[in-house]
Image: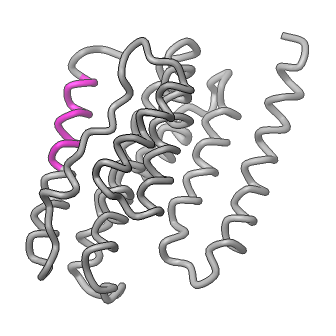
């Protein structure tokens, strides 16, 4: 990925994080200072060691279980996906970065849920709160739509289909909803495995 594109993505992520923190400051009783711990993957660290580091960091910061699990997911599976994408195609890398941004935004949202009352989901403040995540998810889908002729179109479609899982926040029965999302992911996943079986 060209440096200017990467720099632009980083700036957007920082801006989104800043906006989320500004919104959080307006919520009574929310402490932003407790949400700024770094969970970036450390270089030259194996996945097993990474999981151990995540668990240790989670214990040190006394994260609630939902955030501890989310951190483990993000710093193991998501990071592995980001690394694997670099070896395939620039378009896959761009989509992976957009997805990682969406995960970061959802992590910030989940952090707020442990500190504040449930917001009115029809309120402008809630719409502002989730706008960064929605923008990132929209970008994942846009990348898929604009590369339908790519040899990796099924890969892009599978990831785009899977981003629906991050919308579990709005579901009254998230488990049932996620079961449906997984079905869509498997459709493309099975197609990819069939196409690449002998490659």
Vertical placement of 91 versus 167: above or below? above
Vertical placement of 82 versus 33: above or below? above
- Image location (x, y in percent) of residue 36: 19, 49
Q: Quadrant of the N terminus?
A: top left
Q: Quadrant of the C terminus?
A: top right
Main secondary structure type of the part rendered in magenta? helix
Quadrant for residue 97, please give it: top left
Q: Would residue 21 be found to the left or right of residue 183 on screen? A: left
Quadrant for residue 10, please give it: top left
Between 149 and 164, the one nearer to me in the picture: 164
- Image location (x, y in percent) of residue 158: 67, 42
Between 79 and 61, the one nearer to me in the picture: 61
> What kind of colouring is applied to the model shown?
one colour
Q: Would residue 183 be found to the left or right of residue 68 on screen? A: right
Q: Would residue 173 be found to the left or right of residue 106 on screen? A: right
Residue extent of the magenta highlight: 5-15
Q: Would residue 109 be found to the left or right of residue 170 on screen? A: left
- Identified at 63% across, 27% down, the residue is 149
- Image location (x, y in percent) of residue 87: 55, 12
């Amino acid at each position: 990925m060209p440096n200017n594109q990467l720099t632009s993505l980083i700036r957007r992520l920082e801006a989104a994080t800043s906006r989320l923190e500004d919104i959080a400051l307006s919520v009574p009783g929310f402490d932003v200072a407790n949400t700024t711990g770094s969970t970036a993957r450390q270089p030259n660290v194996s996945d097993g060691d990474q999981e151990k580091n995540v668990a240790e960091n989670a214990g040190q910061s006394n994260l609630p279980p939902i955030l501890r699990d989310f951190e483990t997911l993000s710093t193991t599976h998501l990071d592995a996906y980001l690394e694997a994408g670099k070896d395939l195609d620039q378009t896959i890398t761009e989509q992976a970065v957009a997805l990682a941004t969406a995960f970061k935004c959802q992590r910030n949202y989940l952090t707020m849920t442990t500190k504040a009352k449930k917001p009115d989901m029809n309120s402008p403040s809630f719409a502002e709160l989730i706008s960064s995540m929605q923008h990132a998810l929209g970008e994942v889908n846009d990348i898929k739509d604009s590369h339908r002729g790519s040899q990796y179109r099924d890969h892009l479609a599978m990831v785009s289909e899977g981003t629906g899982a991050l919308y579990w926040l709005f579901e009254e029965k998230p488990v049932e909803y996620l079961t449906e999302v997984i079905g869509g992911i498997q459709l493309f996943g099975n197609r990819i495995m069939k196409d690449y079986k002998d490659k």
